[in-house]
Amino acid sequence: MAADHRLRRFLVITDYALPALDLRALTRRAAVPAAVAMAGLAVVFAGGPLRAFADALGRALDADPGWVAGAAVCELLSFGGYAALLWLVGGRATSRLGLRASAQVTLGGAAATRLLPTAGVGGAALTLWALRRAGLGGRAATRTLLAFLVLLYSVFLGAVVAAGALLALGLAHGEGPFALSAVPAAAAGLAIATALALAARGPATAESEIGGLSAATRSARARARFAGAAGVLGSAVRDALVLVRSGDPRLLGALAWWAFDAAVLWAMLHAFGAPPPLAVVVLAYFVGQVGNTIPIPGAVSGGIVGVLLAFGVDADLALVSVLAYRAVAIWLPASIGLAALGGLRRTVARWTREKAPRPQAPAAATTARRPEARPVSARPLPQPALRGTA
């Protein structure tokens, strides 16, 4: 509920102006890595049961610079895939959302998600705001955003199913708890099946259910809201399926978004040591991303580290690799996104000027340029012909 409240508040603000950078929020965000660094220094001097943190910090000095540079390139390619997919979906709804505008929204959304206290929904809110400013109505903008998210997260769910099933069935090497691979795979598969079932029902089913329910009871209203939400999601899935059947190469942007970002984690494991099997890295990455739904700092990092540890990865290697991955995934796009926000503001201002009517010429100037009147003829003037409208 707190996250929903923050999203609504963010949408109200951005409906009028592009959000300015909140320096106090940025300071709070910067305090988290600073606190981690201070805690690491304390562990170095104090020792104790948290010695793994000290080992991880010491190991960071021995990182392979080639793998670190490769990780930075992969992160940029990841955001390139996101922009390509947004260009495809948003461009179908409005011609204003071209490649350049899509890149500005993508990178600006990265800065909003990472630097603004919106519980991880800043990027989606900024995208919705940009779609509205591009000329779409509220319903059309929401439907476009949902279709985009369905395409994006279908890859997420499919990767969890594939990696979890391979590990649970023993088809991929990895020594870890059976439940840690089987349960996420089953949950992701159920989510995919539910979305496809909602799409198969069609829009008329949900609307008829809403119309047939009585609003006299709280239970009926709750069922109506649920049916309405199911209908909206089903429509978004159908829109996404239409885009998939189009075969547009920009659909690969959804795969690039997740694959290249996961490659950053894989590269960091290489930079600090020997990585575990690829299926373990994929499962740890995608299961850890579920932490984005929890508005607690470090939830994603803790989830990824936990899965890696469960599959036998050394604690210092897992910790330093995940912290390095998060540093690249957060601060590299955020720094570029701050510049993109300025470009997006100029783009939206141009859209606003294009929609505004041209100013009328002053009445005095019009009168001054009016030609002199000719003498009136003595002959009677013909009557003007009637137009087709009253």
Image (cartoon, rainbow, N blue to C red):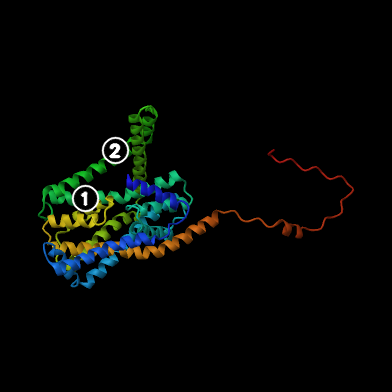
Of the image marks 2 and 1, the number of the one nearer the N terminus: 1
Could you tell me residue 55's position as x and y percent?
Answer: 14, 67
Instruction: From this view, report whether residue 186 is shown above or below residue 341.
Output: above
Q: Position of residue 8 (x, y in %)?
A: 39, 47
The picture places residue 112, in percent across and down from the top left corner, at 37, 57
Q: Nearer the viewer, residue 205 or 322?
A: 322
Does 97 sit left or right of 268 as displayed? right
- Check the image and report above or below for 221 versus 281: above
Q: Quadrant of the C terminus?
A: top right
Q: Is residue 158 left or right of residue 127?
A: left
- Residue of label 2: 197
Residue 279 at least partly seen: no
- State the image quarter where residue 43 is shown: bottom left
> Which residue is label 1 attached to?
160
Write the residue at 16% across / 61% down: 318
Q: Tag 1: residue type? A: Val
Q: Quadrant of residue 306?
A: bottom left
Give the CA separation, mark 2 to mark 1.
20 Å
Q: Residue at x 41, y 52 (%)?
A: 90
